[in-house]
Image (cartoon, rainbow, N blue to C red):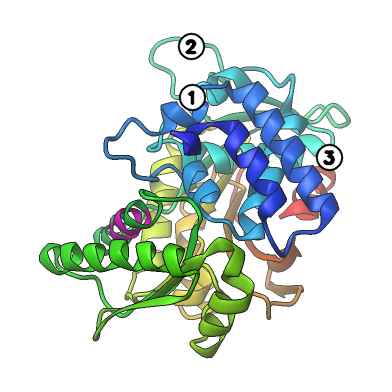
Amino acid sequence: MQFLEWSHHIECLEHMSGFEAHEKHQAKEALLYLQNVLGDDFLRRCSTESPFVARHPMLRWLANYAPSSRRSMTRFANQLRILKGSQNLGNVLGRLYDVTQFDHDALLIKAASRLVEVGLRARFEPTMDVKNNQKQPDLKLEDPLTGETLFLEVTTQTTSQKEREVTDTNSEVFGAVFGPSYELCLSGRWHQTPSQQVLGEILEKIKRAGVNALGDRTLVEVEEEGILEMALCHRDDKESLLDPWSAKRGLSGCGFVGPVMISNDTVRIKRKIRNEQAQLPRDNANVIVIQAPDAFLRAGGVRRVISEVEEGVLEYDHVHLVIVHGEYIDSRAVPFTGHEREHRYTRKIVDGTAENDLLLFNRHSLTKLSDGLLAKFQRFF
């Protein structure tokens, strides 16, 4: 299958619209680097399902022909370049094909690369001597300037059952769209998750729509009242056909949005802190990074997140810092920095992506990071 070959995606870069020449060059270098580091067969190892479904995050990046997806690949490759030579990095690279581990390891790579870039030395798990079933933190960091050693644990906010259903549904839709051809692009909104019977009917409509969109080089809509509104066209016609259709409906022009769901994000973040602190040694300054992309959007704002999560931080005196990290695409977002007592919230714009970081400090922690070391965290988080 062409889609599972690195060369296919390198060649496709030349046909992508909305992409500056230097960005295409960077993306090509990134794909070549990932092929070299991860292996020629990596994309095939990411998908062993038959029929093929793009469940692995890297395959979903590649299935999305928006420039933002290739920027994501470029950033990921750059992070791996920064970490080259770090102890036990090979252990992480060796499991990146595993769809169940990728989100965790991508967050670990991202956090580690930021800190290595400012001069820290990283050692991946195992981070301590392996004996007596000793729990192993994800990352050990050393600051050669101060001699400090700290341990860092990362975790991703697991999705709820309803959110997993949406992801699985989208994967089936992507399979229906890209199964016949990778020349299509799509945009749509879910109003609610369909039943399996209705989903089957929708998938058949999508397949027929894809055939018509390619054959007639036109935009074809797929609608299921109260459930789905969607359109497809040839990827070369995205700018002239799909983008105007999406703009009228407040959509980004690629992929799906919705359905809206109610979630108890802050409760789940505190549960993550409770679980992850058990991995960390009691006699060191320790940091936990939690990826919770929607926490600030769905939990009622930053102040509410602070007030509800802070008690979960103060409970563990061997954890000095908890970072709640999230990112999303929002063309209207602007940079921002604010403080609530000792805590700090920042919003940065990186390649069109809004990155949010809430740094929650534990004033009761027994061992604390030095001001110099904290400054390195605050430079990138």
Of the numbered discs 2 and 3, the one sitting upstream in the chain is 3
Of the numbered discs 1 and 2, the one sitting upstream in the chain is 2
From the image, tell me which residue sits under label 1.
136
CB within 8 Å, label 1 to label 2: yes
Q: CA distance from mark 1 to mark 3?
A: 24 Å
From the image, tell me which residue sits under label 3.
118
Dividing the picture into quarters, in which one does residue 112 lie? top right
| Depth order, front residue of 184/77 | 184
Near mark 3 (Cα within 10 A), the count class, few <14, some 14-19 or many ≥20, is some
Q: Residue at x 52, y 42 (%)?
A: 58
Q: CA distance from mark 1 to mark 2?
A: 8 Å
Residue 219 is left or right of residue 201, and the answer is right
Near mark 1 (Cα within 10 A), the count class, few <14, some 14-19 or many ≥20, is many
CB within 8 Å, label 1 to label 3: no
| Depth order, front residue of 84/315 | 84
Q: Is residue 172 magenta?
A: yes
Residue 302 is left or right of residue 184, and the answer is right
- Please tell me the numbered disc located at residue 77: none
- Which amino acid type is shown beneath numbered disc 2? Val
Can you see residue 265? yes
- Which amino acid type is shown beneath numbered disc 3? Val
Dividing the picture into quarters, in which one does residue 131 lie? top left
Q: Is residue 369 magenta?
A: no
User: In x, y percent, where is residue 64?
Assistant: 53, 55
Compared with residue 237, is residue 362 higher up or lower down, i.e. above or below? Answer: above
Tell me where the magenta segment starts and ends, as one range: 169-174
Q: CA distance from mark 2 to mark 3?
A: 29 Å
From the image, tell me which residue sits under label 2.
130
